[in-house]
Image: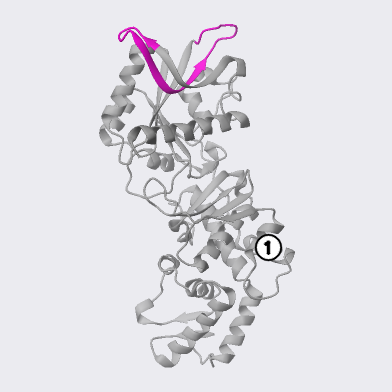
Amino acid sequence: MNSTHKGNKLEDAFYKYLLDQKSRGDLVYGLHPPENCKILRKKEYYCREREDYVQFDIVLELYRQGRSSAHSYVVFECKNYEGGIPETCVTDFSDKLGRIFKHAAKGVLVVSSRLQSGADKVARSRSMGIVKYDEDGLEVVADRSCVESRFVKSQIFRNDRPVKSLKFSAYHDGNFFGAINQFLRSVEPELSVGNEIMEANTRVSVPYVPAEHIKRSAQEILEQIGYKSGPVDLGKICSVLSIDLHFSQQVVQDEDGTLILGSANFDRNSIQINVHANSNRERFTIGHEIGHFCLKHKMYLRSETIVERDLLIDFETDDNFNYDRLEFQANAFSSELILPDQVFLAAIDVGRFQFDIRDRGHGYIFVDDQPCNFLPYDQLISRLSLYFEVSKQAIEIKLRKMGLLNDQRKRNQAPSTARLLRNFHP
C-alpha cells in the first residue's frame, strides 16, 4: 500500500468519525449552531505565494452569525505512517497553514502512530493540535469517564508502558483529551457554548464493584437461560440479551501489532470475536465482552476492544488505569459466568471421588510433584476443562480463588493468575 493510499485510508476513517460524532451531537452542532460551521473534505484555498490553490484533507470552517465568509478554520492533516511521525510532517504542515491562513487557522495533525521526539517538540512549540486516531480502538463516552491524561499521553507520545489503543486521543496546549468535543473547545474557544466550562483533566473514577455483585449479575443471566449443567451456552445468552454475536476469520491488530481478540460496540449492541488460537480462550473472551454489557459499562464506553493484556488483569491496584478496572470487572464476570459456583463444586466432588482425591490433612485438593498426587490432580482438572469447555488454567484460577487448592509443586509455587493466562492452553 503506497503512502498516498494509506493517507487517504486514515482520512476516510477520520472524516467518517467526525460525521458520526456530528450526527450524535457530540461535535460542532452540540457546541456551535449548525448554520455557523461546516465540515469540508479536500477543500482548496488560494495561496498568494504559490499563485495556486492548495488542498487540505479536512477543514472545519467557522462563521460568525450572518456572515457568508469564514472567520476561522480548524484544519486537519492526516498522516498515516507505520513508524513514528517525523519532524518534517509537522513543520511542512505548519508552514503551509501560515502561508494561506496567517493566524486565522488552528492546525491539527491526525496520525495513526506516535510522534518521534523531534516532531513532538515542534508540535508543542507551535501550539499545534495532535490527534491520534485508530478505528479499531476503544471509544469512551466522555473524556472524563475513565481515561486519565497519562493514558491519553501514552497514546500520542512514545512510552515504555504498552497500552491498547483509543479510537480518539488528542493533545493541545499542554492538555490531553479523550473526546473530540472537549479537544475542539481547547483548539477553538469560540466553539464553547455560553459560559459552559468543562475541565478536560477532571478525573471521574470508575467505581469499585463488589465481587458479590458481579457473581449475582452472572447468576441472574444463567437463570434467564435455564442453565443446569455442562458448558454454558454463550450464544444463547447473547440471544437473550439481544446482543449480535458474530465471528471474524481475520487477524486484527492495532498500530503496535498487538492482537485484538475481540470487540464490543454498545451503540449497536454487538460483539465481534476475532481469530483465536483455541476455542477455550475464545469462550472466555465472549464471557468477558458479555460482562461489559451486563455490568453496564456502556456508561463509560461507546465501544471497546480486548487484547491479551486485558485477560491478565486479575487484581486492582492504585497504579491501574481507570479502564483497567473495567477489564478486571469483565474478567471476574466471565469467570463467574462460565464456571458457575454450584455446578463447579458439584463437578469437583464427582471428580474427586472418581480419581480418589481425598483430604488427608493437606487441604481439599492437594498437589505436589509426587506422581501419586500430581497424576490424579491433572486428571481432575482435565476432566473439568472438558466438562465446562474452558482451559485448565482457568480451572486452577477458580480453585485458588475459592480456596480449594493447596499447590505445593516446586516448579509452580504460588503462580500468579497473569502467568497462568499467558499460556492459556486447553
Query: Where 37 falls versus 418 (above or below)?
Result: above
The residue under the point 64% across, 75% down is 230
Q: Nearer the viewer, residue 157 or 282?
A: 282
Q: Which residues are magenta?
A: 46-70
Residue 245, located in which quarter of the rendered image? bottom right
Q: Nearer the viewer, residue 186 or 57?
A: 57
Q: How is the image coloured?
A: one colour
Query: Where 301 falls versus 15 (above or below)?
Result: below
Please count the marks in the image: 1
Disc 1 target residue: 236
The residue under the point 56% across, 48% down is 206
Can residue 153 be seen here? The reply is: yes
Pinpoint residue 377: horizontal percent, then vertical percent.
48, 85
Q: Would residue 311 appear left or right of 257 to someone viewing this image? A: right
Quadrant of the snapshot with the N terminus: top left
Q: Nearer the viewer, residue 99 or 180?
A: 99
Q: Nearer the viewer, residue 16 or 130?
A: 16
Can residue 199 be seen here? The reply is: no
The residue under the point 45% across, 88% down is 375
Pinpoint residue 298: horizontal percent, then vertical percent.
61, 46
Q: Would residue 265 appear left or right of 85 to someone viewing this image? A: right
Q: Is residue 57 magenta?
A: yes
Residue 124, located in which quarter of the rendered image? top left
Label 1 environment density (alpha carbons within 10 Å; few <14, some 14–19, many ≥20): some
What residue type is disc 1 on?
A: Lys
Pinpoint residue 136: horizontal percent, then vertical percent.
48, 45
Q: Would residue 126 appear left or right of 368 to someone viewing this image? A: left
Q: Is residue 350 magenta?
A: no
Pinpoint residue 320: horizontal percent, then vertical percent.
45, 52
SS at circle 1: helix
Query: Where 381 falls versus 117 (above or below)?
Result: below
